[in-house]
Amino acid sequence: MKYAIYLGCAIPIKYPGFEAATRNVCERLGIDLVDLPFACCPPPTSLKMVHYDSWLALAALNLCMAEEAGLNLMTLCSGCVNTLKEANQTLKKSDSKRRKVNRILEEQNHHFKGTIEVTHILDVLYQDSVIEKLIKEKVREIPLKVGCHYGCHYFRPPKIMYPEELSEAESYVPVKMDHLLSIIGMEPTEYSRKFLCCGSPLGANSDQDAGYAIVKEKLRHIRERNIEALSVICPSCFEQFDMGQIALSRKFKDLVKVPTFYLTQLIGLSLGMSTKEVGLDVHRVKSKKLLEGIGIS
Amino acid sequence: MTVKIWNFFPREALYECYQCARCTGSCPALEVASALGPRETILKCLNLGHDEIVEDEKLWVCCTCNVCEDRCPQKIPISDLLVALRNSAARRGNIPDKLEIAIELLAKTGRSMIVHQLDEMRAHHGLAPLLPVPVDEVREILKKTRLDEVVEF
């Protein structure tokens, strides 16, 4: 099993611990990763809103790099997977858009052919063969009540992100992260507003305080269910919860903070990796006490 | 330069809307900030055309979460409408400062984030330096698609 690993911008630059955890986990579970000189995806929350044609052409450049290497592309971020999946689908379907983009790419010696698929680390880990390996390789359980947060762009809009394995008659909210974490002994717990926005794009594009107000409301529901840890698959969601809780606690002194983890950090811990190996030492909301309570240091 | 958005969004789809406001009732941005909300956006497009709406700064107060489209009983492709409207707004100079700065950074460096003391930070996590982005190719592609007509870089 081999993928071109698409790191995006936020993970390798701001949260390289997620990257380290992912690489370690993939190595242990027999997933080979190849690095290519990818550019920004670019985000569905920024360039797409400002200039669709530029957004599509730049996404096509990234897709071409993976095509040229003959590899499917695995992303680590809900935003990146949204852009690259939509662009891939659009360019495969629309002859006119593909012609237009290829006229520009050909000057840079690239040509979009439509030969690869785009996927996300969560979907890669959820495959039967990987889960079987995880069950065999895991050395400890992580008995914590966990709230999963998928990130809107991982599953919306459905016309792009709807999983191929489901029939259109089925209603769809993602469940894969909840299932995976139950395999490593966590207790996935539902909470109100689980499938609504973390507030990140609102903060980034217009109003930071409004973005954090969304986090505050979400946290209220998360704490109501006595959730001890949050799991995310997107660096923007992570930032909202990690930095967001620090910012909110300056204003609201009685705020009880909930440590947030990137999915592969939790999988890594269950495979016996140390907290440093999965990069937990740089998180702002500390998880040391929580993890020591279940014998992980 | 004025660009009619109907090249990018099927105008007929607007007439499917019966103003049930399920979209606006689900909108996380509208709950915490002064936003237009999808229902009002569609109504204004129907009644006033899109010229007026693209001048409104509130058009940008949005999470881009697409929950509106997800919950629309009429299956109106609202996310496509919002992209088309904002593309048109940006072309007329209606674009939030923060977003303009972010796009400029992307066009100049090929990344959405400033790379600063990166190797040291990556080494802390046992990671190799990041592969360089082909910045010249990125800039050329963005020039050819005429991004510089909207954001200078």
Image (cartoon, coloured by chain):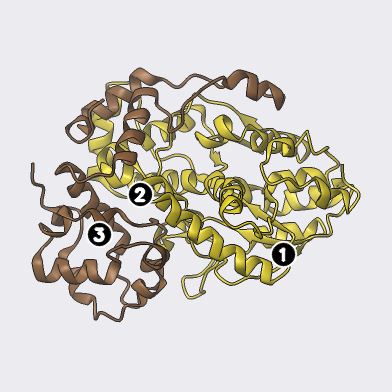
Chain colours: A yellow, B brown
* Distance in Å between CA atoms under marks 1 and 3: 37 Å
State whether residue A237 is above or below residue A73.
Answer: below
User: Which mark is in front, 1 or 2?
Assistant: 2
Tag 1: residue type? Ile
Nearest the eye: A62 or A72: A62
Element type at marker 1? loop
Residue A86, image x, y percentages:
39, 49
Q: Which corner quadrant holds the C terminus of chain A?
A: top right
Marks 2/3 same chain: no
Element type at marker 3? helix
Residue A80, image x, y percentages:
47, 43
Residue A154, image x, y percentages:
51, 54
- Chain of the residue that carries numbered disc 2 in the rendered image: A
Q: Which residue is mark 3?
A: B81
State whether residue B77 is above or below residue A123.
Answer: below
Tag 3: residue type? Leu
Q: Residue at x 25, y 79 (%)?
A: B19
Question: Residue A227: which numbered mark, if any?
Answer: 1
Image quadrant of residue B147?
Answer: top left
Q: Residues within 10 Å of mark 3 (few under 14, many from 20)?
A: many
Q: Residues within 10 Å of mark 2 (few under 14, many from 20)?
A: many
Element type at marker 2? loop
Q: Which residue is mark 2?
A: A206
